[in-house]
Every structure is written in structure tokens, then in C-alpha cells.
Amino acid sequence: RPAIVDPEDDLPAAFVYIEAGDPEEVGNHYDYAATMTIEIMISGFENLDNEIDQIEVDMNALLDADETIGGVLKTMVRGGFAYDHNPETASMTLALNYLIYYED
């Protein structure tokens, strides 16, 4: 999960984490299906919706170019998303969920 960040100094930022996964024994190794979340956090007083959406477009273009992330994953499938506005800190997050497959 994202650590505490200072909206004035540390943003924009992206956090990547795996929340849950299920192993499947395949011969002498394990294959995993897991949920990976990429959370984008921005701040400011401009149109945060447009800014965070553009970051998502740019990030998805990178992921589409190599869905194995340099061979780390077997594959990934886009899942759900959630926006969260925080008017007290003039910040916004967008959490993007992916179903990922990898082997151990």
C-alpha cells in the first residue's frame, strides 16, 4: 500500500502493489494468479481529472507495449478502477486493478 506522501513535495507518484494471489502447482514450480494495483496520486488546483486521465493513458501505452513487464509476468488483464478525490489536500488518486499471471 502507498506510504504517507507529502502532496506538496512528492507528487505526482505511482505505487504498485500486489494485494492477493493464488498459487497453482505446475510440475516443479508454481504459477500464480494475483491482483496487482497501480495507484496514481496527483495534487494541485487545476483540472485533476484531465491530468490523472492523461497519466493513465501514458501508463497504459507503456503496459500495452510490454504486458509482461520485461518478462516478469506471463500476462496481465485490465480489471476495475476507482477514483478518489481529497479536497482537504487538493489531491486525487486513481487505482487501477489488473489480474496478473506469473510463475515462481
Image: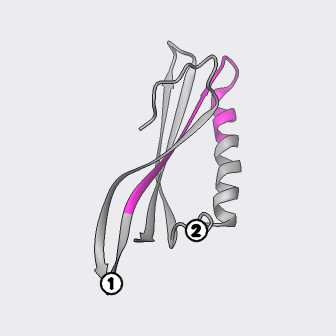
N-term mark: 2 or 1 = 1
Q: Quick one: quadrant of the N terminus?
A: top left
Q: Position of residue 77 (x, y in %)?
A: 50, 65
Q: Are marks 2 and 1 in contact (CB under 8 Å)?
A: no
In the structure shown, which secondary structural element does the residue marked by tag 2 occupy? loop
Question: Residue at label 1?
Answer: 28
Q: Is residue 92 above or below residue 31?
A: above
**Residue 101, picture quadrant:** bottom left
Q: Position of residue 26 (x, y in %)?
A: 32, 83
Magenta segment boundaries in residue numbering: 34-53
Q: Is residue 97 left or right of residue 47?
A: left
* Residue at the extreme front: 28
Q: Position of residue 29 (x, y in %)?
A: 35, 79
Q: Is residue 16 above or below residue 21?
A: above
Please say whether residue 75 is one of the residues in the magenta stretch: no
- For the point 51% across and 73% down, which residue is it? 74
Q: Is residue 47 above or below residue 52?
A: above
Question: Residue at label 2?
Answer: 68
* Residue at the extreme bottom: 27
Q: Is residue 104 left or right of residue 24?
A: right
